[in-house]
Image (cartoon, rainbow, N blue to C red):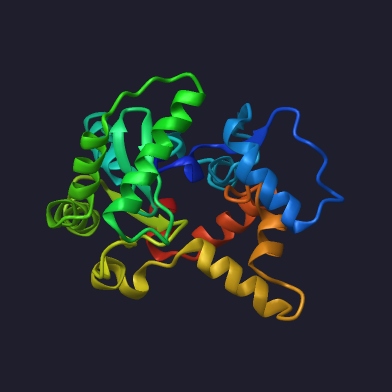
Amino acid sequence: MANVAIIGSSFSECLYSVKDEPNMSGWTTEKRIEWAETEWPLAFILEQHEGHWVQLLEERYPQHEFHIFAKGGAGWEYSEITLHKVAELKFDRVIVELQEPRLMLDNSTHVCFDPSINTVKQIAEEISKTIAWQSARGKQIIFTDDVVNYIATYIAGPVYATRYRQYLLSLKNVWPKVFDKVGVWAYLPINMPWSDLDLYAEIFGDELKIFEDVAIEEWIRKDPINNSVETWRTKYCGSDRQHANEEGMKLIVDFLLKQSSIQQVLE
């Protein structure tokens, strides 16, 4: 038996749904997208573990104990802190989910960056949006425009890029010396959208597959005429069109079981 720590973001934390979610069965894709963009961010979010990919792994591998340390919105900085924590707790193995670089403002506030963001100004705007979103949900974060611009400039600079690169390298060169087994996977592309650095290719290459890329490619290949990115999200994602629903969780499990580093953790 092994104690397995699950580290990552909301994709690894739980199965998300919305309280009093409307019936979208007759909705067009455009209406679903509009609801996800305007209503979901301020909706009352429900979290459940039944049907989540970790719970599905527990059923398949009852000889192991799985403990979730993932946190919604969290990125590599939170994961790095958590790796130290689970090492202190003497966990045997870890499964680490990677995602696009995210900024940790405090322990519960993380900024996610859209792949289209590529300038300091856009980074600053995204930070300000997250602060405003948190304020709308009742959490007050007070940063002046100068502070936000300073943070954005730092994020786009070489020091942050070096820190992020060292974190990714540590998953291959450092943490496997601490834990018995280290499994790594990614739901979303992991490169910094504002940088020309291809850390994905440099550090992982073909060793690391991106779940969403693989799943959508397979979906479209089945029926190139009728299947698309948006129809995949309608079928396999929740109402926010980002997080996997119960059917999507089954896809994640199938995907994970094909990744060599995850196979080693589960053996």
Q: Is residue 218 above or below residue 191?
A: below
What is the x, y in percent for residue 131? 39, 32
Residue lying at 63% horizontally and 66% vertically, measured from the top left: 229
Viewer-proximal residue, 220 or 103?
Answer: 103
Q: Nearer the viewer, residue 266 or 208?
A: 208
Note whether residue 40 is visible: yes
The part of the image, by quadrant, that contains residue 38 is top right
Specify the quadrant of the image occupied by residue 86. Answer: top left
* Count of marks, rendered view: 0
Task: Say which residue appears at 26% left-offset and 42% top-offset.
Answer: 77
- Residue 240, image x, y percentages: 63, 45
Quadrant that contains the N terminus? top left
Q: In the current view of this chain or complex, which residue is farthest to the right?
A: 26
Across and down, in percent, residue 20 comes to 75, 28
Q: Position of residue 204 (x, y in %)?
A: 29, 68
Taking the view exactly as shown, the residue that stands out farthest to the front is 145
Residue drawn at 50 percent across, 66 percent down: 258
Q: Is residue 121 left or right of residue 212?
A: left
Q: Is residue 70 visible?
A: no
Write the residue at 30% across / 58% down: 119
- Image check: 138 left or right of 42? left
Placement of the C terminus among the 4 image quadrants: bottom left
- In the image, 254 versus 60, the foreground residue is 254
